Image: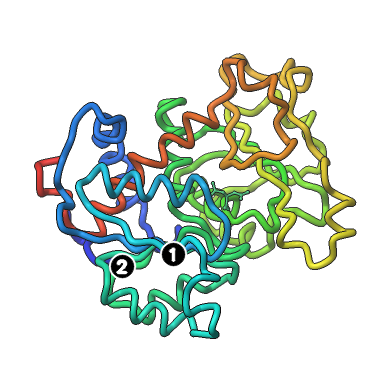
Amino acid sequence: MSDFKGSDVVSIRDLSKGRIEQVLALSEKMIPYARGEKSTKALDGRILANLFFEPSTRTRLSFESAMVRLGGRVIDVAYPAMTSVAKGETLADTIRMVESYSDVIVLRHPHEGAARLAAHFSTKPVINAGDGAGQHPTQTLLDLFTIRREKGKIEGMHIVMVGDLKYGRTAHSLAEALSLLGAELTFVAPQNLQMPRETVKEVERLGIKPKLASKIDDAIPQADVLYVTRIQRERFPDPSEYLKVAGSYRIDKNLLREAKKDLIVMHPLPRIDEIAPEVDNTPHARYFQQAFNGVPVRMAILLLVLGAEANEGF
Ligand code: NCD
């Protein structure tokens, strides 16, 4: 089962159902290592290059934690202003150089398509950690992992996605993967921030007919999972357009009164004001658990793309 070795992870569409299952199964085994209860040197001597040209806390740190937990090392560009990118170096040249310093490249970039371009120029696996308003496939894998762990299954679950579905890359990747795995979907967004047509078409091609809505209240009682996203301020061409939709949704205890008892609330984070802090202490909140799950899932992805999953008999 090492056909994963050497693969890029640019879009969730690059992963078949079988590969998604493979990542989720291996992620489960990684939990005690991610917690530091067991240790391994499976990626001893390997180097991960973290290239982040946009802000990040969780994705960058959880990739780093994952690599270190596996006995590997990380080199890192956290401040592009301090590199030759600031002198005008192209992404293609940066990648051609970084691939000679490392075994796997993790890239976050403000432009949609940047990771695909990087993968084209790199002989080493490139993992997309977010390309503009495009895709964020490793976030999706950890989101799927969280739903599976918390609900026991994905097929037939009703996932309500709410917020900025137009610019939110986590929403794009997740909607496609959930369709592939047979979940029911409702997309709740202000009309001008609804899920892009292209994503809706892909969801439909996979056999799911999503419900589109602009009001959250009606969607709550049916939801098994409420996936909340931030309005992506940095992607609005016009700040006044942002101000019109800022604060459109706020999930609070009152809104959750009509929810199923076992509803889980997820968020890729960071949150701004779309989930009230009072929700944190309810049995619904799962977003911090979800953030932890980034470590075992990214451990699994690194093992698979580096072809090392068999090293210690995982
Ligand atoms: C997300 C992202 O960068 O797309 N953050 C993350 O990786 N957890 C979500 C966001 O920034 O809103």
Percent of width and height locating residue 292: 43, 34
Dot 2 corresponds to which residue? 125
Q: Does residue 11 appear in this view? A: no
Callout 2 touching callout 1 (CB < 8 Å)? no
The answer to which image quadrant residue 6 occupies is bottom left
The structure residue drawn at horizontal position 38% and vertical position 50%, both measured from the top left corner, is 63
User: Going from the N terminus, do you reach mark 2 or mark 1 first?
Assistant: 1
Distance from disc 2 to disc 1, alpha carbons, whole Å, reads 17 Å
**Amino acid type, callout 2:** Pro
The residue sitting at 45% across, 25% down in the picture is 150
Residue 125 location, x and y as percent?
A: 31, 67
Mark 2 is surrounded, within 10 Å at the Cα level, by few (under 14), some (14 to 19) or many (20 or more) other residues, namely many
All told, the count of numbered labels is 2
Mark 1 Cβ inside 8 Å of ligand 1: no
Residue at (26, 76) in percent of width and height: 100
Residue 262, horizontal then vertical, whole percent: 56, 18
**Residue at image point 20% right, 47% down:** 71
Compare residues 77 and 128 and report the one nearer the observer: 77
Q: Which mark is residue 32?
A: none
Residue wearing tag 1: 77
